[in-house]
Amino acid sequence: ILNVEQSPQSLHVQEGDSTNFTCSFPSSNFYALHWYRWETAKSPEALFVMTLNGDEKKKGRISATLNTKEGYSYLYIKGSQPEDSATYLCALGSQGNLIFGKGTKLSVKP
Amino acid sequence: KAGVTQTPRYLIKTRGQQVTLSCSPISGHRSVSWYQQTPGQGLQFLFEYFSETQRNKGNFPGRFSGRQFSNSRSEMNVSTLELGDSALYLCASSLAPGLAGGRTDTQYFGPGTRLTVL
């Protein structure tokens, strides 16, 4: 059974702080790693899909890196804003569906 | 372009009843996947439909079933509801089906249906 782990479970930062979280996954038979942002009472929003070792993707103040050989991905948020408060999910694209981690809940205090 | 819509948004049922949830994908998307989220758990894959055929199935009992119509709209059904079926049910659509090897396309999620079983 494939397992996707995310750490930390939750994070509280001040507005303006930069932060990062980790997604760990089995490195064998890798196909894709997905990142989503999920705000309360909204739909999960796709951030990135990464497929190649060493991939780096950026969207505004959010960026992500991928290391498929060691089985991890980092998500970085530069200069956190209160509107960044959400749960960030990573998911392994495997066997035709997504296998999700339990997420990192980020709270940004003004 | 309209996003993925799910109806109803909230539902309360009692044990033993059955329930049907509906999902309308983004226009042009033909793949619809269903996921369940229970407290403390990540999103768990239920099944995927493409061109009215179930392509992939997660590890859920046979009480959970689904179907897809020719317009790509999908329904999932849960029969003989149990307390543990209380969860948020999300559907996601994409252009293409998941490959047997891995899912590399972006899936777009709806807001979910919150099911409470009493």
Image (cartoon, rainbow, N blue to C red):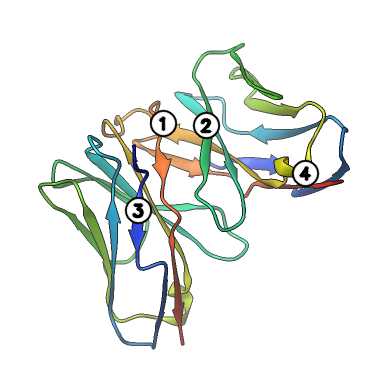
Q: Which residue is mark 2?
A: A34
- Rendered view: A54 above or below B17: above
Q: Nearer the viewer, mark 2 or mark 4?
A: 4
Q: Which residue is mark 1?
A: B106
Callout 1 amino acid: Thr
- Rendered view: A27 above or below A41: above
Badge 2: chain ID: A
Q: Nearer the viewer, mark 3 or mark 2?
A: 3
Image mark for residue A82: 4
Residue toward you, B10 or B31: B10
Residue A76's image quarter?
Answer: top right
- Residue at the farthest left position: B70
Q: Are marks 1 and 3 on the same chain?
A: yes
Callout 2 amino acid: His
Q: Is residue B18 left or right of residue B116?
A: left
- Residue at point 30% right, 81% down? B80
Dot 3: what SS? strand
Q: CA distance from mark 4 to mark 1?
A: 26 Å
Q: Is residue A57 left or right of residue A93?
A: right
Q: CA distance from mark 2 to mark 1?
A: 8 Å
Image mark for residue A56: none
Callout 3 amino acid: Thr
- Residue at the farthest front position: B1
Location of residue B100 in the rendering, given as x and y in whole percent from the top left corner: 29, 31
- Residue at point 57% right, 31% down? A26
Callout 4 amino acid: Pro
